[in-house]
Structure formats: C-alpha cells, structure tokens
Image: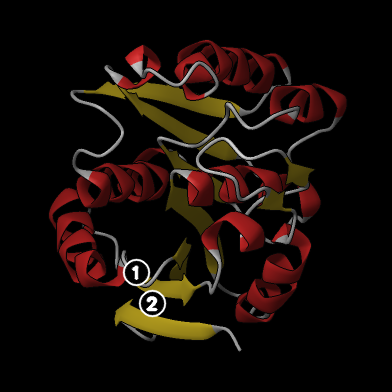
Amino acid sequence: MTEFFEYGAPSASVVLIQPVSAHDLPEIEEEARAIRSLTDAEFRLIAVKVADWDADLSPWRAPAVFGNRDFGGGAEGTLRAILPLCADGAKTYHIGGYSLAGLFALWAAYRTEAFSGTAAASPSVWFPGFTDFMKANGIQCGAVYLSLGDQEEKAKNPVTASVGDRIREAREILTAQGTRCVLEWNPGNHFRDAALRTAKAFAWLMNNGRE
C-alpha cells in the first residue's frame, strides 16, 4: 500500500508531488522549508513513499547498474497510485524528485497531461534507452527543470558517468520540441544537497515555469 505524507498548506492551489523512499523522508521537512525560502507561492507538498525504489520508479526493466538487482519496471503502477492525487482541475500539479525519482517524474510527464511542470533534480537520465524514449515521444507538461551536480559525470561507474552527456541531450530534445526547459549545474557529486536541489527545482517551476 502506497503511503502519502503532506507538508505545506493543505488548501494551496499549487500541489507538488514527489516520490520518496523511507530514507528520504527525514529530509522532506528541510526541503519544504527550503522551498518556502525560495518562493512566495503557497504550496502543498505530497511525498509519495515507494516500497522498492529500483522496482517502483523504473519505467521499464533494465539490467542492474549497482549490485545484482535489476530494475523492475514498475513505474506504471506507481503512476496509477499518484494520479488520483491530481483530480482537482482547479489546482496546478507539478511532479518532481531526485535521482531515480527525477527520472520517474520526467517519464510520468510523457505518460499523462496531469502535470503542468516537472522538477527533475539530478535525474537518472543514464537509464538505458531513456533519451531514445524522449526522442520518440512528446512530453505533456509545459516546463521542465533539470539539474546535475558538476562532479556526477566523473563517477567511476561508466553507466552513471554518462549522465552529463545524457542530461545535455535531454535538454536539447526538450528545447527542440518547444518545451520551456532549464538545466542548472550544482556543486558536488550525486549525494550532495539532495533536499536543496529538489527544492530549487520545484521553486523554479513555481516562480518561472508557469504556462
């Protein structure tokens, strides 16, 4: 059963939806405070706790990159659990996340028009076949924020080290397709300032990414 944790103003017209793991939850309050410091807009942040990060957020099955657990391709089920949260047509919904959750957010915006913007902070765009998927499909949101740490493409793992080339390619694809898109580079590797990076992504959508 999917669990939801809410932060911010329950009646806000802007709703931020973010898949998280149990490990992420202690940082979500910090993230919400950071968002409040970066925008004057009221928001409701819904953290959607997933049970199995690699299985529940991967858009299709793929070989393991870390250890020996393959990616399970369970994103469709996670999206089905999230969409009922977007039922009020009077509200604006943005989806976002960090790392594989950032990749999921990008993928989800191709699968539904429920979201006005996508906040993809250090997304795992190295995921096999993902930029090919972007080329072959049209995203259904109006604005996308991308970010990456400036040390991430220097990772020892050759698959994840491709993230720099892939995120540049993703920006080019989105821009060529007419999507409002920004790519911001942050200091540090993939494990630095995840809450702040995600907060900056959501705040950009609220401040600059309006349709």
Above or below for 117 versus 50: above
Q: Residues within 10 Å of mark 1 (few under 14, many from 20)?
A: many
Residue drawn at x 32%, y 48% as measured from the top left: 198
Q: Find residue 170 and name its label.
A: none
Amino acid residing under circle 1: Phe
Name the quadrant of the N terminus: bottom right
Residue drawn at x 38%, y 77% as measured from the top left: 12
> In the image, is 4 to the left or to the right of 132?
left
Return the x and y of residue 123 as percentages of the image width and height.
48, 37
* Nearest the eye: 55 or 180: 55
> In the image, is 171 to the left or to the right of 185?
right
> In the image, is 171 to the left or to the right of 44?
right
Return the x and y of residue 20 as percentages of the image width and height.
43, 65
Amino acid residing under circle 2: Ala
Q: Find residue 12 and name its label.
A: 2
Count every numbered label the image shows and give the total.
2
Mark 2 in CB contact with mark 1 (< 8 angstroms): yes
* Outermost residue toward the right in this view: 136
Residue position for label 1: 43
Q: Is residue 210 visible?
A: no
